[in-house]
Image (spheres, grey):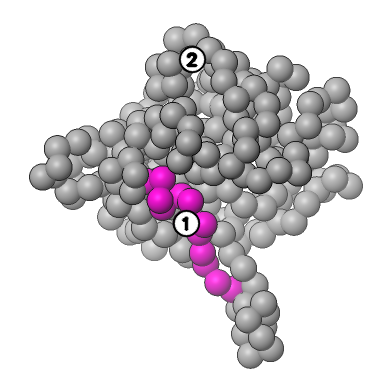
Amino acid sequence: MNVREKAPLIGITCSRLTGGAWGMYSLGHFMDYTFSDYSQAILHAGGAPVIVPAVQDRRSMGTILDSVQGIILSGGPDIHPRRYGEEPLAGLGEVDEALDQMELAAANLALEKNLPVLGICRGIQVLNVALGGTLYQDIPSQVPESICHTPKTDKAVNTHTVRIEPGSRLHKIIGKREFWVNGKHHQALKRIAKGLAVAAQAKDGVVEAVELPAKRFVVGVQWHPEGTWRDDLCSQKLFQALVKAASQIRSF
C-alpha cells in the first residue's frame, strides 16, 4: 500500500466482560473489549483497527460496517447451539447470546456488503453458522480420535500442523501446503455451510480453515494468528492479505 494512502479501517468484533468484575456498582453491566494482539497485528499489516461493539440492532451494525473497509470476526466463547438447530450437549462451554446476535448480524451484513472478512477461532464458526452450517459442540466427546486442540500453552506457541488445500486462496496467501499453528479450541465446524470451501484440515480431519470463493475476500481460520504474528511469517501474511483486500475498497 502506498504510504500516502489512508490506511483502511479494519473492524474487530468485541468480546464482552461482565461488569461485576469491576465491583458491585457495575453488576449487570458489560464491558466491550478486544485483545490488543488483534489491533497490533492489523497496525503491523498497514491497517487501522477499530473495535466493533456488541450493538443489538441490525441497522446500527449496518451503519458501523459502512464506515470500515474490512472486518475481523474475533475469538470468544461458544456459540449457542440453538443458532444451528441443536440442543446443548454436556461438553458445551460458556455462551453469550448477545454476542452471538451481534456477530451473526455482522457476518451476514459484511457478506452482503462484500467486505473483506477474516474469521479467527470463534470467527470461523460464526461464518459457518451464519451461512447455515453446524458445529461440533465439544471435540473431545464428539470426535474422540482427534488430536489435542486445547493445549495448555501460551497463545504464542504453535502446537499442531494443518494441511492446506492446493489452489485455495489460503494456499496462495501462505505459500505452503503444511505448517504449524496455535490451535486453542474445543469446538469445530461439523456440517460445512453451502458456498464455503474447506481450505485446511488438521491431521485428524478437523476443519481448520474455510473460504468463500464467491466473495472478494472471506477467509476463516480455526487457530489464532494474532497470537503468533510477531515471529511467524504465515500469520503476518494473513493480516497483510486482509489489509490488502480492504485497501482496494475506495469508500474511505
Q: Sequence order check: which comes first, mark 1 or mark 2?
A: 1
User: Relative to 55, is 130 above or below?
Assistant: above
The circle on residue 176 is: 2
Please tell me which residue is depicted at 45% across the width and 10% down the height of the picture: 167
Describe the element under mark 1 as helix, strand or loop: helix
Q: Magenta region: which residues?
A: 30-42
Report x, y in % for residue 146: 80, 25
Residue 198 in which image quadrant: top right
| Residue 59 shows in this picture | no
* Farthest-out residue, top: 166
Disc 1 designates what residue? 36
Q: Choose between 58 and 4: the one closer to the eye.
A: 4
- Residue drawn 76% across and 44% down? 152
Please say if 114 is above or below 199: below
**Which residue is at 71% across, 56% downward?**
95
Dot 1 amino acid type? Ser
